Image: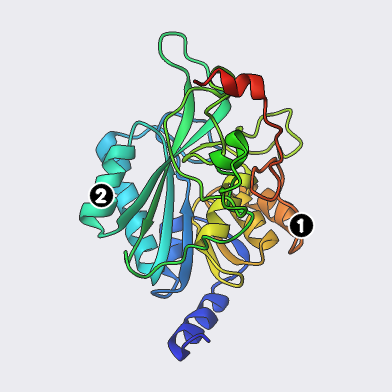
């Protein structure tokens, strides 16, 4: 049962727009929220690599960009509950600086540095093609946080189950982890959803999931894993950079509340339209690999080549 203080906090959030997409600067918007009202925050900010957004200018000097990140992260830290969880998506260029800022300056505790690997990466002519995003998983209190380890939609088949057909394998599967790995077509015998390099394709133009109005749409399966693992039904999810609305869509499907901020009025309106047509219990878009859905047959000839 929620404490009186927590109930008052939720009521305060309701006054400021729970389950709404708020248009405007996220720092100013979060300042209107009370302390300790958010259970889980997912932040996918601009990467400062020159992407063409509707209104935001994605090319700042390093110090300016990092100073801005410090500003919005301090607000996220303030509005998170004492047992709250934070996920930050960021590219190679600033992940090291943000990790240090989060843990040494702001006092978060890093639980995992997940690599989201995707197909259809950004092709590079004179470099290795960009095909991953960093997902920093942090908590405010290393002893008190939510992690739903037994959710069947979170667990994945173990190697005992998937490769070796070992009867000793736990029928409920195992939790995902993270490992640097070659592309699936280059390492068929080793790349699986049970690793912490998450293999989820980017949402491309030909995908049914694609909304079309935002160039950096997050896949619902990535948010599904995060929200299922790190929050409970009825809890409140914050996204300061809502963009195409994926965080709110998945939160609604999984019976969570949400608070979203979006600088672009055009993006915000289209995100609202996207959110309005989903219902609690709707299936997530895209293909997820879980213990409940993965029934991939074993290729015994391929297995024999491993040894």
Instruction: Name the residue beneath numbered marker 1.
Output: 282
Left or right side of 244 for 293: right
Left or right side of 185 for 67: left
Up/down of 210 relative to 150, above or below: above
Label 1 element class? loop
**Crowd tier of the residue under label 1, counting other residues whose Cα lies within 10 Å: few below 14, some 14–19, many 20 or above:** few
Label 2 element class? helix
Up/down of 1 relative to 60, above or below: below
Question: On residue 26, which mark appears?
Answer: none
Up/down of 13 relative to 301, above or below: below
**Viewer-nearest of discs 1 and 2:** 1
Up/down of 31 relative to 109, above or below: below
Residue 31: image x %, image y %? 40, 67
- For the rendered model, the colour scheme is rainbow
Q: Nearer the viewer, residue 290 or 121?
A: 290
Residue at 67 percent of width and 38 percent of height: 213
Residue 215: image x %, image y %? 60, 34
Is residue 81 among the parts visible in the rendering? no
Instruction: Name the residue beneath numbered marker 2.
Output: 101
Residue at 66 percent of width and 51 percent of height: 271
Is residue 186 among the parts visible in the rendering? yes
Residue 302: image x %, image y %? 62, 20
Residue at 47 percent of width and 23 percent of height: 130
| Mark toward the start of the polypeptide (1 vs 2) | 2
């Amino acid at each position: 049962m929620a404490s009186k203080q927590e109930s008052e906090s939720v009521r305060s959030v309701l006054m400021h727009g729970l389950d709404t997409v708020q248009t405007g600067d996220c720092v100013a918007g979060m300042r209107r929220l009370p302390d300790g009202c958010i259970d889980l925050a997912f932040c996918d900010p601009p990467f400062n690599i020159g992407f063409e957004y509707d209104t935001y200018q994605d090319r700042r000097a390093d110090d300016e960009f990092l100073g801005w990140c410090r500003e919005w992260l301090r607000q996220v830290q303030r509005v998170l509950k004492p047992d709250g969880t934070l996920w930050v998506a960021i590219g190679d260029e600033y992940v090291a600086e943000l990790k240090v800022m989060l843990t040494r300056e702001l006092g978060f505790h890093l639980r995992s540095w997940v690599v989201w690997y995707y197909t259809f990466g950004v092709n590079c002519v004179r470099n290795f093609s960009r095909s991953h995003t960093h997902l920093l998983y942090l908590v405010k209190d290393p002893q008190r946080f939510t992690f739903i380890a037994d959710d069947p939609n979170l667990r994945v088949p173990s190697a005992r189950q998937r490769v070796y057909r070992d009867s000793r394998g736990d029928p409920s599967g195992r939790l995902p982890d993270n490992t640097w790995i070659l592309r699936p077509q280059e390492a068929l015998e080793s790349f699986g959803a049970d690793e912490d390099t998450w293999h989820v394709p980017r949402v491309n133009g030909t995908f049914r999931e694609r909304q079309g109005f935002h160039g950096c749409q997050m896949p619902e399966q990535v948010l599904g894993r995060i929200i299922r693992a790190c929050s409970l039904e009825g809890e409140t999810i914050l996204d300061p950079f809502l963009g195409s609305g994926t965080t709110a869509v998945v939160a609604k499907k999984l019976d969570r509340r949400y608070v979203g901020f979006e600088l672009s009025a055009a993006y915000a309106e289209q995100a609202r339209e996207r959110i309005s047509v989903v219902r609690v219990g709707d299936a997530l878009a895209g293909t997820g690999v879980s213990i409940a859905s993965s029934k991939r047959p074993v290729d015994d000839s391929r297995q024999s080549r491993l040894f």
